[in-house]
Image (cartoon, rainbow, N blue to C red):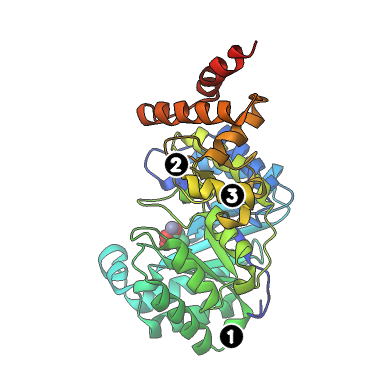
Amino acid sequence: MAVDSNKLIIFDTTLRDGEQSPGASMTKDEKIRIARQLERLKVDIIEAGFAAASQGDFESIHAISGIIKNATVCSLSRANDKDIARAAEALAPAERKRIHTFLATSPLHMEKKLRMTPDQVFEQAKMAVRYARKFTDDIEFSPEDGSRSDIDFLCRVIEAVIKEGATTINFADTVGYAVPGLYGNMLKTLRERIPNSDKAVWSVHCHNDLGMAVANSLAGVMIGGARQVECTINGLGERAGNTALEEIVMAVRTRKDHFKLEIGVDTTQIVPTSKLVSQITGFAVQPNKSVVGANAFAHASGIHQDGVLKARDTYEIMRAEDVGWAANKIVLGKLSGRNAFKQRLEELGIKLESAADTDAAFIRFKELADRKSDIFDEDIMALVSDEQHSHE
Ligand code: KIV
Ligand code: ZN
């Protein structure tokens, strides 16, 4: 895909890299429920698992391949014939299927983990892609630990696998070592130096060890020209997790003026998907998590509440409803002002007789809020009952 394409492909790997989160393993039925929800979310590609990793993973990918109609289904596979054949078998029922094969290219991984020479890695990568092409023409190749690899060697391997038929090249920051400028520029250099680079879609795959997975992914898109982002719901994933889908999608949508890219995702399905993944894996979403955290659209300070009640744009850069929340929240507490208090009275259908009654109720509310951090609607109703009854 030429880099001037303005479509950003969303590749969801919640069911594969997300599941590599210690403690997040899922049953086949759970994976199917999530895959259906990812289809509702309208992601482009669902990486459903790693077929050769276990019988359970194989069966999950096979089942998902038979169910999902509106997304490409993908299986991960090491760069060997046995794994690739297993991936192809698992994906057989899929209308659109992708084999994603990977091989480490960094000096550290080649020498210490694979115990292979660079020439052996080069040959194996080519053979793997050539073999995978027998089953589908949608082949992704990932140079694992790509961001710590030698650029000359990367150029050599990537040029060769594209010649063998790889259609997506996924520049992996396997250990979350990258920083945005360097990562984006490395990708740009690769694309500039590899003569057949425009024959493939370039992808980013970042881990969050230094908290920069989303920033690195966006640098890969903006500086490097990547047009696929690999990501997971709630940023679930190995160690500190992967690039969070909801953050990428909402960054690109909210700052369309800057990114100028199209995404096919139905953003109103983001929160339902986040809740489903959290419920199935048992991984709670932190309250202050961007987009999907319980506080992401909650306003607690009086100044902010007053601003939002007058014009939401004052303190909201996106709408809660657009990502699947019912509404934003004005949280009443000790920082709240008179305006937010009056608004809540209205929402509760409470009409006080006079401004003096409202003032008295507001003073009691502030006293209560100093003692109690969570003020519920029941507290407000109890609080105003004196004023209401005094006029009966
Ligand atoms: O982090 C990584 O390198 C991976 C590859 C398999 C793409 O998950
Ligand atoms: Zn990964």
User: Residue 308: which disc?
Assistant: 3
**Is 251 or 121 nearer to us in this picture?**
251
In the depicted structure, whether residue 53 falls above or below residue 251: above
Which numbered disc, 2 or 3, marks the residue that appears first in the sequence?
2
Q: Which residue is mark 2?
A: 287
Residue drawn at (39%, 78%), measured in percent from left and top?
182
Q: Are marks 2 and 3 in contact (CB under 8 Å)?
A: no
Residue drawn at (51%, 69%), measured in percent from left and top?
218
Rendered-image quadrant of the C terminus: top right
Q: Secondary structure at mark 2?
A: loop
- Identity, as a three-letter code, of the amino acid under mark 1: Asn
Look at discs 2 and 3 and give the one toward the viewer.
3
Give the Cα separation between the discs numbered 2 and 3: 20 Å
Q: Secondary structure at mark 1?
A: loop
Q: How many marks?
A: 3
- Identity, as a three-letter code, of the amino acid under mark 2: Pro
Q: Residues within 10 Å of mark 2 (few under 14, many from 20)?
A: few
**Is 91 or 206 nearer to us in this picture?**
206
Give the Cα separation between the discs numbered 3 and 1: 51 Å
Q: Which residue is mark 1?
A: 196
Which numbered disc, 3 or 1, marks the residue that appears first in the sequence?
1
Q: Secondary structure at mark 3?
A: helix
- Identity, as a three-letter code, of the amino acid under mark 3: Val
Q: Residues within 10 Å of mark 1 (few under 14, many from 20)?
A: some
On the image, the x and y values in percent for residue 7 come to 68, 69
Does ligand 2 reach within 8 Å of label 2's beta carbon? Answer: no
Specify the quarter for ligand 1: bottom left
In the depicted structure, whether residue 206 falls above or below residue 327: below
Which numbered disc, 1 or 2, marks the residue that appears first in the sequence?
1
